[in-house]
Structure formats: C-alpha cells, structure tokens
Image (spheres, coloured by chain):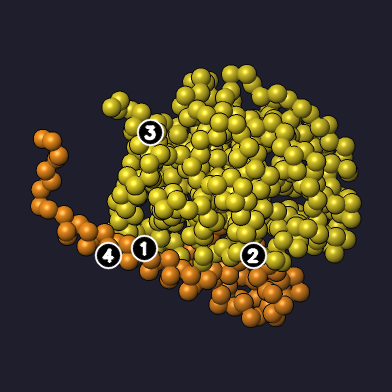
Chain colours: A orange, B yellow
Amino acid sequence: MCLGIPGRIVAIIDAADAMAMVEVGGVRRPVNVSFILDDRPVEACIGEWVLVHVGFAMTKIDEAEAIRTLELLQELGELQAELEGMQPETDVAPGS
Amino acid sequence: MRYVDEFRDPDKARALVQDIGRLVLRIPTARRRPLQVMEVCGGHTHTIFRYGIQQMLPDALEYVHGPGCPVCVLPMGRVDDCVALAERPEVIFTTFGDAIRVPGSRKSLLKAKAEGADIRMVYSPLDALALARKNPEREVIFFGLGFETTMPSTAMTLIQARAQGARNFSLFCNHITIIPTMKAILDTPDLRLDGFVGPGHVSMVIGTRCYAFIARDFGKPITVAGFEPLDLLQATWMVLKQLAEGRCEVENQYGRVVSADGNKRALAAIAAVFEPREHFEWRGLGSIDHSGVRIRAEYAAFDAERKFGVPNVRVTDPKSCQCGEVLKGIIKPHQCRVFGTACTPETPLGALMVSSEGACAAYYSYGRRAPAEQVPV
C-alpha cells in the first residue's frame, strides 16, 4: 500500500496541472509533481530523482544522504572484516 | 535500478547481521526473553519475508508485525459499504488493487465485480478523476484508504476536482493516521515491545519529529527505515544499538527520503481536505480515538458518504479469526486456530491473510514459521 519507487523526471507534460513525465525502471508514466515544487517553476524539477507513489512525486531523493547511508554501511563492513581478521583460526569453546 | 540495487548488497547485509548478533549479546533483556522489535509498516513486513530477514537474525530477536497494512485493518462493515456503493447502477467504483479481494460479510469487491458491478482498479486517484471526466453520465467513486503516505494524493485529487468543477466524482474516505494508532499500541497493557522500526513513507509525509513522544513518554527507541533489505537491517541495528547503549531516541535511517519536518505541501493538502473523526473502527483492534479522518465540510460535495447515504454497516469479525491478537503481537500468525486451514490467501477469512503486506499472508507464502519454532532447542 505504502510502496514508493524511485524515478527520474524527464519532461513536463502540463505545467498548469503540475504534470510531468517520470521514468521509473525504464517505463515512462505521467506523475503529478505539485508536492515537490516548493514555489519553483515546474521546469526546475526536470532531471531530479523523486519517490513516486500512486501517481504523485512525494519527495526529492537526497543523493548526499543516500551516499552517507551507504558510507556508514561500508564502514561497518570494513570494521567487521577487521574484527574477523582478529579472530583466532579455530574457536575453542569454553569449558570443553 | 538506482537507489534500489545499492541497498540490496549481500556483503553489507552480512556485516550488519553479524554486528546485530554482537549487539544482542550486549542487551541484558535478551538473556531472559527474545527482544521484540515492531515494524509498524506492512511494507516492512513484506521486505522481512521476501528477503528472509528474520531467518538471518539471532533467535533472541523477533519482529512483531504491526498494524500498518491499511487493507488488513479495514473492518468488514466498511467493505460491505463499498459493495453497496459499487452495486448502484449509476456508479463506477474505483479502487487500488490491494483492496479488491478483502472479504466483506457478504462478498468482496471482486465477487461484486464478477456479479456485474462496475468496479475498476486504478493506479492513482487522478486516474479515477480522469474516468469521471470521460464518463459524465456516471458517478465515479474512489475508495480512499491508507495512512498519511496515500492521503496527500487523494487530498490533491479532491482539490483538483473542486477546481475543475467536477460534479460526478466523490471519495469514500477510509484514511487512517499513524500517531493515534501507535499510541493505542503503546497503551496496551503488558506491552513487551522493546523498540520500533518506524514507517518510511508515512514519515516522508509527516516527518520524524512527531514520534518524540515514543521515546520521551514511553521510553522506547524508534528508527525510521527505508524498504530495501539493507535499510531494514540497518534500522534494526540502530534500534539495537540504542538498546545496548541504554538510549531511547527517534532516529532516521532513511535520510535520502525522510526529513524531520516531512513534506509541508503534502501536509497542507491533507489539512485543507481532511479533519479527524472522533473514532474509527479497526479490524482486530476495535475503535481507536481520532485514528481516522473524514472530509471537511468545504469538500462535502465530493464526499461519497454524504452524497449517497452509505449504509454504515457494522459487522463483528468471525469468531474463529484471531487477527486482533496477531496485530498486537500476542500470538504469531501460524498460532491462529484457522491459519492455513479455513483461512488461506485463496479464501481469506481474516484480513491479515488478504494483502501481501498482511502478516498471515506473508507467513503463508514465505514458509509459515520461523526456524526457531521449527527446530525445538
């Protein structure tokens, strides 16, 4: 129900109705962009990545935040690899 | 696909799973009983089952599948109201695909369609409005349901309908709101939940500030999460880190989509069109104060309830059905007495078996039970 899918705005269809063409996974469909305009002219959103839900662009996707999340995950992965490197070759169960 | 594939990287998932295992060992509660983290949103429930996330995690950590599947919590009486509206000869009844198989007390919308009612599935409420323009001699009703994610879209559609002077378009409003629902869960006596994975796309609209009461008044951590497997694992990791460090805060894992304040334009559209109802009936949970919205008087002309005099049917859930106990996390789906026998995805008795986001349908489709319960230790 609440699913959203990332898409990129490729053209404006109708500026008065705030309708734009969005490419989602190789498929193009009309999407209403009125929630992401913030007093900008409609044309300003061309090229932006947005999250599409039931025919509306609900938010601009923040690329810097996406990168930051992935970097945090990367760091955790590296830390993990380091920790694994510190493990002894074979575990000896205590009390056995 | 961009912003999707990066968040499915199996190496990063493995690292998270291992660190989650380490964090669980640091949380004292986990030595007495399994930690319970509720994912509020049905979309997260779907991710957990689709990717087998529960099976990757330690036995001392359990997801409790929350009430965030709007199709699942819709009471039977409202489905009966839908069928009554849809069976009027002048009506074209439009709905999202999710809702069409939900059983009413007499029939589902799908059955009514098979019997001749003009019921059409639409992708967007705007498609329903376009249908009204194309069929001026018919009455087009859109079945609006869902949390705050979907609400701005129906609100904007009504705003456009009014601006266009549409006379044959109306909304059957069954929208519900997340905050009163979470309060109702937190007020449940004997609540054992240790923390929450917060809804991603609801929060995209309402922001994260409104969850402050969960940490402040109830002492539970909450992390808002995205819908890819890495999102969910990272958010779970963040909740556990809070528990391990004795913190309870509102955190946001889904920064690429969710901000602290939400989407102001979307919130303004909601406020212009909708106002809270005093009560709204939930399937399995009963009545929750202020959890539903209705259409404001300014938009009365577009309110199907006012326009057509909806029968307002009240039906009690089937006695054999234990959806309510599953929703509150008291029992697991497969512990329900009709799970997989009288109640299956093909012939659902309870709403949780209907939608792919429903906990029971997910249990049924993806393996029925958690490994911890398959293999007695």
In this picture, residue B174 sits left or right of residue A92: right
Of the numbered discs 4 and 1, the one sitting upstream in the chain is 1
| Chain under disc 1 | A
Q: Measured along the vertical axis of the image, is residue A60 above or below residue B200?
A: below
- Which sits in the foreground, B240 or B172? B240
Determine the residue positioned at 74% across, 39% down: B289
Identify the disc placed on residue B32: 3
Labels 2 and 3 in the same subunit: yes
Question: Can the viewer see residue B130?
Answer: no
Labels 3 and 4 in the same subunit: no
Identify the disc placed on residue A73: 1
Look at label 2 and name its amino acid.
Answer: Asp
Residue that label 2 marks: B261
Of the numbered discs 2 and 3, the one sitting upstream in the chain is 3
- Locate residue B72: give its quadrant: top right
Look at label 4 and name its amino acid.
Answer: Glu
Q: What is the x, y in percent for residue B363?
A: 45, 34
- Which sits in the foreground, A55 or B338? B338
Structural distance between the alpha carbons of marks 1 and 3? 30 Å
Q: Measured along the vertical axis of the image, is residue B4 above or below residue A60?
A: above
| Chain under disc 3 | B
Closer mark to the observer between disc 2 and disc 3: 3
Question: Can the viewer see residue B24?
Answer: yes
Q: Measured along the vertical axis of the image, is residue B172 above or below residue A32?
A: above
Q: What is the x, y in percent for residue B230?
A: 40, 56
Q: Residues within 10 Å of mark 2 (few under 14, many from 20)?
A: some
- Which sits in the foreground, B19 or B305? B19
Residue that label 4 marks: A78
Quarter in which the C terminus of chain B is drawn:
top left
Quarter in which the N terminus of chain B is drawn:
bottom left
Q: Are marks 1 and 2 in contact (CB under 8 Å)?
A: no
